Image (spheres, helix red, strand yellow):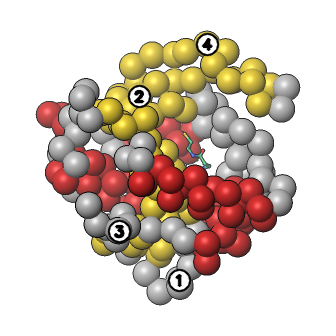
Amino acid sequence: MSDALPALAGRGIRLRPLTQADAADLFDVFSDPRVMRYWSREPFRHLDEARRLVEDIEAGWRGDTLYQWGIEPDGAGRIVGTTTLFQISTAHRRAEIGFALGSAWWGRGFARAAVERLIAHAFETQGLGRLEADVDPRNAASLGLLERLGFRREGLLRERYRVAGEVQDSVILGLLRTQWTPP
Ligand SMILES: CC(C)(COP(=O)(O)OP(=O)(O)OC[C@H]1O[C@@H](n2cnc3c(N)ncnc32)[C@H](O)[C@@H]1OP(=O)(O)O)[C@@H](O)C(=O)NCCC(=O)NCCS
């Protein structure tokens, strides 16, 4: 096992491991109410939450339960979001994917490039056969991105989350290695 997640080069971006030096940039992303509108938890309020997230990411990597990369656009010199493989099941060769980008960076293709690269890594390097995503049905940007990349809607789970007093449904989407076309 290497001592960190590999850095992965994509189109105009790099996926790279996160360290405590990224905590302030992670805080920017996960304290942004527009980013967190359909998230399964409320926005961060304190920088310490971002520091704890880095600790959880490091522990997740060591335990092979969660792989979370920073998304760094070429030339930006900082991370502007993250993308994640979690709920990893080696036995069933599947995992769930997640992604978030600071709202100042939306609409420039960075999320698409990042998730495209993550999918290729999951299928080609990690040997997974199925990826899943769990999205609020009102989250048009996330659904649009996933469907653009070949994910199909597989079902609606009702009243799956309660966040800040609001009940949220989930659309479950899936992408199979056998139906995936490499970019
Ligand atoms: C989802 C998110 C990462 C998309 O970021 P983005 O910068 O707009 O994405 P990109 O510019 O890379 O766009 C990629 C594709 O997403 C889709 N998309 C983006 N915004 C969309 C919108 N508002 N409605 C429909 N589709 C949209 C499009 O298919 C687009 O491809 P195209 O431009 O070739 O048509 C961003 O909105 C975000 O961080 N949202 C908050 C966090 C979140 O909800 N994460 C997912 C939890 S399940």
Q: Is residue 104 left or right of residue 181?
A: right
Q: Counting residues from the N terminus, which is met first, the one under dot 1 or under dot 4?
A: 1
Q: Is residue 3 above or below residue 175?
A: below
Q: Is residue 103 visible?
A: no
Determine which residue is flagged by label 1.
76
Question: What is the three-letter code of the residue carrying label 4?
Answer: Arg
**Residue 24 bears which disc, if any?**
none
Q: Counting residues from the N terminus, which is met first, the one under dot 2 or under dot 1?
A: 1
**Residue 3 bears which disc, if any?**
3
Q: Quadrant of the C terminus?
A: bottom left
> Is mark 3 in CB contact (under 8 Å) with mark 4?
no
Question: Measured from the top left, where is residue 79 in percent x and y?
Answer: 55, 72
Question: Measured from the top left, where is residue 165 in percent x and y?
Answer: 85, 26
Question: What is the three-letter code of the residue carrying label 2?
Answer: Leu
Determine which residue is flagged by label 2.
173
Determine which residue is flagged by label 4.
158
Q: Counting residues from the N terminus, which is met first, the one under dot 2 or under dot 3?
A: 3
Q: Counting residues from the N terminus, which is met first, the one under dot 2 or under dot 4?
A: 4
Question: Measured from the top left, where is residue 149 in percent x and y?
Answer: 33, 45
> Is mark 3 in CB contact (under 8 Å) with mark 1?
no
Question: What is the three-letter code of the residue carrying label 1?
Answer: Ala
Question: What is the three-letter code of the residue carrying label 3?
Answer: Asp
Q: Is mark 4 within 8 Å of ligand 1?
A: no
